[in-house]
Amino acid sequence: MLNNTDRTKESSEMTQKDKVFIGALSRYIGREVRLDGWLYNSRPSGKVQFVMLRDGSGLCQCVIEAGNIPEELFEEVKRLGQESSLSVTGTVRAEPRSPGGVELAVTGIAIHCFAADYPITPKEHGIDFLLKNRHLHLRSQRPWCIGRIRHTVIDAIRRFFNDNSFTLVDTPIFTTIAGEGEQTLFEVDYFGQPLHLAQTGQLYLESAAMSFGRVYCFGPTFRAEKSKTRRHLTEFWMVEPEVAYIDLPGLLNLAEDFVFSIIQRVLKDNRSELETLGADIASLEAIQKPFVRLTYTEAADILTSSRTKEFMAAQFEGFLAQKKAYETELTGIEAMDAKGGLKKWQQDKNARRILEIRTELAELEVKIENNPKHAQLASDFRWGKDLGGSDETIISLMYGRPVFVTHYPRAAKAFYMKTDRGNDRVVENFDLLAPAGFGEIIGGSVREDDYERLLARIREEGYNPESYQWYLDLRRYGSVPHGGFGLGVERTVAWLTGEKHIRQCIAFPRMMDKVYL
RNA sequence: UCCCCGAUAGCUCAAUCGGUAGAGCGAGCGGCUGUUAACCGCUAGGUCCGAGGUUCGAGCCCUCGUCGGGGAGCCA
């Protein structure tokens, strides 16, 4: 074992080699480089060791042959635990047998920290365990891929607005007025004054839009909703553009261009991450403008139509067929196991597959159980109700593209939305439903710009007009048609990555009844 | 708030009818010069979530509790 002085000496020699990030390695074939990283996995094989090194930009297979480094060090590396930190030097070479097509022929190694008993192994783990170890779990492949895609999404968001003459305005987190319903506010004691955490920057943003014309805010949003579902967090990130002099069709076009630009950027920058995650790349590529545009009334008609009834029935049959297929496979595997004579690796493979099938079957059971309920909810749908989660899922599954739903009943929506002047039962709003049941990723509207109407709506909701004085002012001094929308970052990332649960789409999730780290 | 499911080795899970607690991974030791969640051999590792009850006997049955997962309602 090297003592610390030796290690320091060796490290300083190593720092003279050019440090390269794994993500850029293919440009250094034939060159001698240094990688700094962590041991992801290792496969010692007699006189050759294959060490998977992770450096934050990617994974690289490092091949260590006995004789190329001191024997003592070679033996030491064999005993390195997962997530030990080390620097390696060597020559980059193309190698088809290596995952990624490139590998490092190692000539030198410096060990920085021996890690032992790393809790997250390269096998399956339960979600509770992983979230308890979220500080380490972030190093694993799946969270890493999702984190990279989230980064691209956020960059694409900023790029889109900055390139389209929007001005960034940071709205406050401590707020004095509600935007989305006062029962879901987190209250904080602000030196004795009760304030609450922002549910939206919108009201402030409307003020700023009258100064800059086109503005956006981007930050965390807090909602104390009692929602324990895979689509909900109590703290999530939302980007909200707000535009002066715009109507509903203009907003839809803006949202469409915006979402489309995000998809294109992720497809361009994160193809390998999408592949690793098993995301539905073909479906993302197939998305073209224009998206589907439905009014709420049309959506309601669709839900209660025979077409939906048939759709749900066909879906039900599909689930049953799928279930049967899984059960047949399961029986087959069990018969194979019972017959005996299998190699150990075959038994392992079967055991893994059985686990997979059981998980799938459990999910199918839930779907089979829910399908008739959802079908019933849809066929019982009455004009005036808000669209439920299952209704949104049905609509989005019936089209392969994102779907806009516009003109919701006024009574089901927030006070600030503009009443349709041609039909005062509805407002000029819209939701954007992501395909494949990933739900609502955007909610937006044209804002009520008439002072008297807005005041009446505030009173109708039972809010105190005093608190909304400054907001009402915007309708007294140069009111114009304006509007905007909010896009939920985690829901968008969940959709693009195919991740079923939104809690995997943020580094440190805050859920209704559980905060881990 | 309501409904369903679960808790067994560090992790993921088995355990037939209520009858001696099991496997894989991980850990340790040994083997292997091209591995792909490598493979092969050996070793160690258990308060079966907690409390009570039924029984000759409980991981398994009953009651209560704790924690976790999924779903409903509500929402981005």
Image: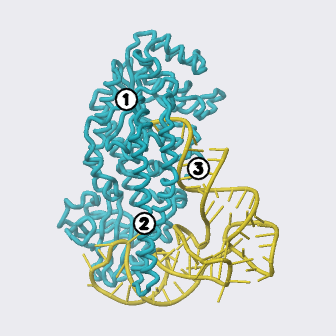
Chain colours: A cyan, B yellow
Q: Nearer the viewer, mark 3 or mark 2?
A: 2
Disc 1, SS: strand
Earlier in the chain: of badge 3 and badge 2, it is 2
Looking at the rendered structure, the kind of residue marked 1 is Leu
Front residue of A257 and B36: A257
Residue A326's label in the rendered image is 2
Q: Position of residue A443 (x, y in %)?
A: 42, 32
Q: Is residue A252 above or below residue A306?
A: above
Judge left or right: residue A509 versus residue A483.
right
Tell me what residue is drawn at x 40 percent, y 65 percent.
A325
Q: Are marks 2 and 1 on the same chain?
A: yes
Crowding at mark 3 (Cα within 10 Å: few <14, some 14-19, many 20+): few
Tell me what residue is drawn at x 39 percent, y 38 percent.
A433
Residue A514's label in the rendered image is 3
Tell me what residue is drawn at x 32 percent, y 63 percent.
A59
Tell me what residue is drawn at x 43 percent, y 64 percent.
A324
Alpha carbon separation for disc pair 2 and 1: 51 Å
Residue that mark 1 sits on:
A168
Front residue of A133 and A412: A412
Looking at the rendered structure, the kind of residue marked 2 is Tyr
Judge left or right: residue A264 versus residue A40.
left
Looking at the rendered structure, the kind of residue marked 3 is Lys
Disc 3, SS: strand
Instruction: Give the letter of the chain under mark 2.
Output: A
Q: Nearer the viewer, mark 1 or mark 3?
A: 3
Q: Position of residue A505 (x, y in %)?
A: 43, 49
Q: Position of residue A71 (x, y in %)?
A: 34, 83
Q: Are marks 2 and 1 in contact (CB under 8 Å)?
A: no
Residue A252 visible in image:
yes
Residue A217 visible in image:
no
Instruction: Give the letter of the chain under mark 3.
Output: A
